[in-house]
Amino acid sequence: MGRIIACSNHKGGVGKTTSVVNIGAGLARLKKKVLLVDMDPQANLTQSFGVNDPEFTIYEALKGEHALVPINADTNLDVIASSLELSGAEMELSSEAGREYIFTELLDPLVDKYDYIMIDCPPSLGLLTINALTAADELFIPLQPHYLAIKGLTKIIEVKDKVKKRLNKKIEITGVFVTQYDRRKILHRDVVDTINTYFQDKVFNTKIRDNIALAEAPSQGTDIFRYNPNCFGAEDYMQLCKEILKRHSQSK
């Protein structure tokens, strides 16, 4: 059975989608079978793999029109596409019985087909994110090394705790990692110290350095490893993937 990991931070601009794209691509390169789920109406993950106007998206699946339909993006790597129409899903599903479990039921037939399923949550803590957390085993939180980013953590931890209590007993925060890091900046180093103090062993040692290639790769419809395999971004995300695999092997 695959590990289901939700990646969430309701603060935008923290590199959440970039991280899901490149962690997924990195794990696939390390011979893991990976499914990435675009749960964000902005559909940035979908577009990052050059998927435009997909025939099947998560929106129709959530409405019960069809099952989840994976799209192959690369060797060992599939994607569940999103679309702007997903922005209306929260209102449309709000009256559905068991609405928090709709995505869990959709995902169930696919779980045994993948080693890793990663969900790119929207930058909000509404019904779509609740559905992702209800389905997930683990929660990863990407953070910018800014003090305001830390202050915004209270809400996501509160929502995770409520989901754990009421909907999904197994969900845990198992990974926190820093993006857009510049070790030359005292502020960045200070914030990382604060994050380490608060989350302790949940913080990954790998930090994703600020790297322009990470912003350029989506415009080419590809991940960082195919776009520029020798840049800092590729180096950092591959190191993070190896750290994820090491942690998971130790936790078995």
Image (cartoon, rainbow, N blue to C red):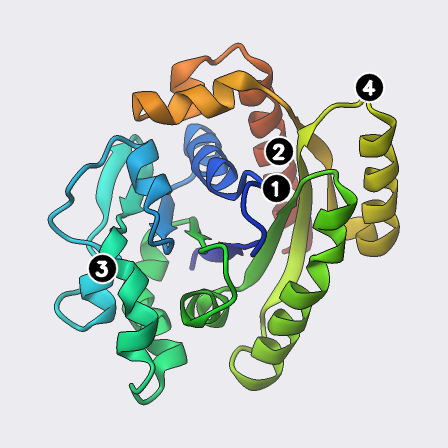
Residue nearest the observer in this picture, 112 or 65: 65
Regarding mark 4 in the picture, which secondary structure is present there?
loop
Depth check, mark 4 against mark 3: the one in front is 4
- Percent from the top left, x then y, of residue 233? 56, 21
Q: Residue at x 34, y 81 (%)?
A: 94
Q: Residue at x 45, y 13 (%)?
A: 228
Q: Which disc number belongs to residue 184?
A: 4
The residue identified by callout 3 is: 68
Task: Give the spatial CA distance, label 1 vs label 2.
Answer: 6 Å
- Percent from the top left, x then y, of residue 218? 37, 27
The residue identified by callout 1 is: 244
> Would you place residue 112 above or below residue 244 in this image?
below
Q: Going from the N terminus, do you reach mark 4 or mark 3 first?
A: 3
At label 3, counting other C-alpha atoms closer than 10 Å, the crowd grade (few under 14, some 14-19, many 20 or more) is many
Q: Which disc number belongs to residue 240?
A: 2
Q: Amino acid at mark 2?
A: Leu
